[in-house]
Image: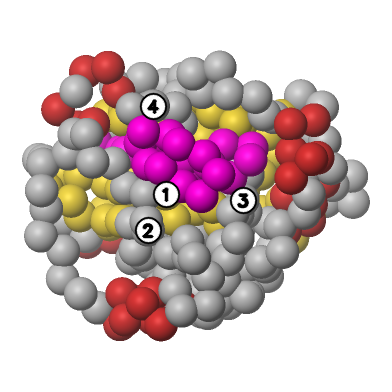
């Protein structure tokens, strides 16, 4: 990725303070709290920002493991399937980028970059305690938004690592410039069910809740994904991301 100057903000200060209590914690703040809702069957959970409300999505830290290889300029990362064979419950990411300055009109040809940890909480590109992901590229990718402002990624449900609630990182670029760095939050009841299955079971339950996380602690209203699916066939996570361009 081309170097991009980022201004330090209150979120970055909070991140620095939060790191004193956890080795690999990415921190910042988001928006006012909002409860999620789940169907009685437990298969669909709603959250996030609707086009009707036309809200700006909270800006968040890129965390300790952002891309450092230049995904935007590397055609190998322009891909829908980012799993690279990683085990985990299938997850489809369906993201829509909208412009809050134009009544949440779709933003076309925006580059959307995503990255996340695997079922065991490990990231590619970086050496971490107990795992060396140096030289690996799994669970990272870029897509261009279509005429409806949409991109779709095929991935796995993210695992977790100490000090962080379950999340996926998202960065949006317009004309090569970063315009939004944020994170997708997940409903805790869904994550709890996923973490009792398959590749996640040996890692156990996430010990950090959304409210206890230093990114999502002041709310997930603009970042909480709408999920549909189940722990057998997998999930689709939908989120509208409001930017200002």
Disc 4 is placed on an element classified as loop
**Residue drawn at 23 percent across, 41 percent down:** 68
**Looking at the image, do the residues carrying marks 2 and 1 touch, with CB atoms under 8 Å apart?**
yes
Disc 2 is placed on an element classified as loop
* Residue at the limit of the structure toward the right, as seen here: 40
Sequence-wise, the earlier of marks 4 and 3 is 4
Pair 3/1: label in front: 3
**Magenta segment:** 107-134
How far apart are the two marked residues, 4 and 1, measured between alpha carbons?
17 Å
Who is closer to the viewer here, 207 or 108?
207
- The residue wearing badge 1 is 169
**Which quarter of the rendered picture does the C terminus lie within?**
bottom left
**Residue drawn at 74 percent across, 45 percent down:** 203
The number of discs equals 4
- The residue wearing badge 3 is 160
How far apart are the two marked residues, 3 and 1, measured between alpha carbons?
13 Å
Q: Crowding near pointer 4: few (<14 within 10 Å), some, many (20+)?
A: few
- Which secondary structure class fits the magenta region best? loop
How far apart are the two marked residues, 4 and 3, measured between alpha carbons?
19 Å
Who is closer to the viewer here, 93 or 168?
168
Q: Position of residue 213 (x, y in %)?
A: 57, 71
């Amino acid at each position: 990725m081309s170097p991009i100057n980022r201004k330090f903000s209150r979120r970055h200060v909070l991140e620095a303070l939060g790191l004193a209590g956890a080795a690999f914690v990415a921190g910042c703040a988001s928006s006012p709290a909002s409860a999620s809702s789940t169907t009685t069957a437990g298969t669909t959970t709603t959250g996030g920002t609707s086009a009707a409300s036309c809200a700006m999505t909270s800006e968040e830290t890129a965390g300790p493991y952002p891309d450092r290889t230049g995904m935007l300029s590397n055609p190998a990362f322009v891909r829908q399937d980012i799993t690279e064979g990683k085990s985990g419950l299938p997850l489809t990411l369906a993201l829509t980028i909208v412009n809050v300055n134009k009544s949440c009109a779709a933003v076309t040809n925006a580059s959307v970059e995503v990255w996340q940890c695997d079922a065991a909480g490990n990231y590619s590109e970086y050496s971490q305690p107990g795992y060396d992901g140096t030289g690996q590229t799994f669970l990272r990718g870029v897509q261009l938004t279509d005429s409806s402002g949409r991109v779709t990624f095929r991935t796995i449900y993210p695992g977790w690592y100490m000090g962080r609630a379950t999340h996926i990182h998202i960065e949006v670029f317009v004309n090569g410039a970063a315009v939004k760095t944020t994170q997708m939050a997940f409903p805790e009841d869904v994550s709890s069910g996923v973490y009792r299955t398959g590749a996640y079971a040996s890692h156990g339950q996430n010990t950090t809740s959304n409210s206890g996380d230093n990114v999502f602690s002041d709310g997930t209203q603009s970042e909480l994904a709408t999920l549909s699916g189940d722990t057998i066939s997998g999930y689709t996570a939908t989120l509208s991301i409001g930017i200002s361009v």
